[in-house]
Image (cartoon, rainbow, N blue to C red):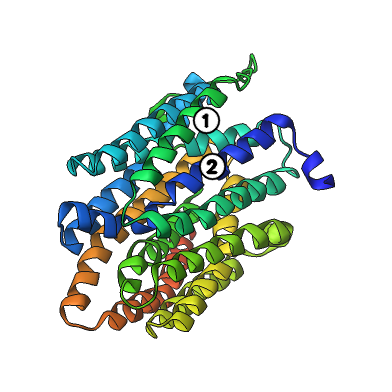
Amino acid sequence: MTGIRRFTRVQLALLGSGFLVNLINFSVYPYLAVLLRDRMNLGMDQVGVILGLATFVQFAGGLPGAALAERLGLQRCLLAAMVLQTLGSLGFLAGGAWPALTIAALFLRSAASAVYSPSVRGYTVLGATPDERPRLVSASYATGNVGIALGPVAGALFIHDPTVMFAVATVLHLAMTIGHALLPREQRADHEVVEPLRRALHGIAVLPFAVTALTLYLHMHFYQYLSSYAEGRVPAVFYGSAMMAYSLLLAVIQPLISQRVERMRYPHAMALGFGGLAVGMLAFTGGNEIAIAAGVLAIGAGNSVIFLKNTLEALARTDRSPTVVFGQQRLAEGAGAFLSGLAGGGLYQLFESAGNLAGFWLAIAAQCLLLPPVVILADRMLRRPAPEPTGVS
C-alpha cells in the first residue's frame, strides 16, 4: 500500500488505462499473423509487410504524436487516441464479414497507439523530479506489461471465433473514451516553448535511439512470428500462457531492478538484454513446450533490462522534454519493427518453404550476438574527434 500511495490519483488512473489498453490490444496482436492468414488468405511474406507497416505507424508515429501532444495538450491527445481505439475495435468486429476492414482496423489502432503512448507516459511523469522518473517509468512499464500478459490468454480462447472478444473490446474502449474525457487538462507553464514538428528530432540521444531500433528489430521476430511457428506444435492455450508469463516477468522484474538498471553501464545492459534474446531464439529451435517456455523466459529476462535501460538512457542524454524523448524512442522502435516485418516475413517464408524453421531462429540468434557490437563500434567511431590538421604554420 505504501508504494501505491506514492502515486497521485491521476497517475493511478493513467497506469490503469495503460493496463486496459494493452490488455485489449494484445488479446489480438500476437495472433495477427494467424488472423490475417485466416481472413485474407495471405502468404507469410505479405503478412510480414502488413505487420511491418502497421508497427511502423504504431511506433514511428510516436514522434509526430509527441509533437502533437505538446501542441494540443496531453489530455486532448489521450482522448483522441481513445476515439481511434474504439473505431479500430469496431473495424475488427466488422472484419469478420468484410475482411478488408481487418487491415483498416489494424492501422487505426496503430495510429491510436502512436498518439497514446508518448501522451500517457508524458502525462505520467508530468512534474516528476529526475529521481522520481525511474519509479514512474518502471511502474508504467509494469502495469502495461500486466495487460500485455493477460491479453494473449484471452486471445488464445477466442482467436478462432473472435466476434465476442472484439465486441467486448468495443464496449471497453467506449467506456475508456468517456473516462479520458474526465481527466484534468494539464496546465502549461508560461515560459514553456512549444517547438514545431520539424525540430522533433533535435537533441536526439543517438546511441539509445540506435540500440532501441536494434532491440525492436530483433524482438519483433519473436513477437510476430512465434505464434505461427507454435501453431500445430503446442496448444494455443499453452502459447498464450507462455506469452502471459513473458509479460508478467517484465512487470515483476522491472520495478525491482529500476534503480540498479539506472546505475548500470549501457554496454553491460546491452550484453544482458541481447544475450537473453539470443538464448531465447536458440531455445525455440526445440519446437516443443519446454523449449518454447524456456525461450520466452530467457527473452523476458533480457528485455526486462534492455527495454528499461534504453528509455532511462535516452532521458538522461538529452534536455528535451520527456514527451518528446518518448516520441523519439517510439520512432526508433518503429524503424526496428518495420525492418523486422519486411526482413522477417520473407526470411520466415524462406525457411518455411525449405522445411527448416529451426534455421530461422538460428539466423535471428546469430544477429542478436553480432549486431550489438557493430552498433557500439559505429557509435564510438562517430564520436571520435577528427584529427587536427598538421602543417606549417
Query: Mark 1 Cα within 10 Å, few/some/many (few <14, many 20+)?
Result: many
Residue at the location (59% across, 61% down)?
248
Q: Quadrant of residue 169?
A: top left
Q: Nearer the viewer, residue 32 or 357?
A: 32
> Which of pointers 2 and 1 lies earlier in the amino acid sequence?
2
Q: Residue at the location (52% across, 30% down)?
A: 176
Q: 377 or 103: which is nearer to us?
A: 103
366 vs 95, left or right, is right
Asked which quadrant contains residue 319, the reply is: top right
Q: Secondary structure at mark 1?
A: helix
Q: Nearer the viewer, residue 158 or 214?
A: 158
Residue under numbered circle 2 = 20
Q: x%, y% of residue 304?
A: 59, 63
Task: Residue lying at the far top in this picture: please name it.
Answer: 190
Q: Is residue 1 left or right of residue 66?
A: right
Q: Tag 2, which secondary structure?
A: helix
Residue topped by disc 1: 176
Marks 2 and 1, Cα distance to the nearest angstrom?
9 Å
Q: Residue furthest right?
A: 2
Q: Position of residue 340 (x, y in %)?
A: 31, 60
Amino acid type indicated by mark 1: Met
Q: Residues within 10 Å of mark 2 (few under 14, many from 20)?
A: many
Given contact means CB atoms under 8 Å apart, are the residues at marks 2 and 1 in contact? yes
- Label 2 sits on what residue type? Leu
Residue 243 in percent (x, y) is at 48, 64
Residue 185 location (% of width, % of height):
60, 18
Q: Is residue 222 left or right of residue 306?
A: left
As drawn, 232 above or below 393: below
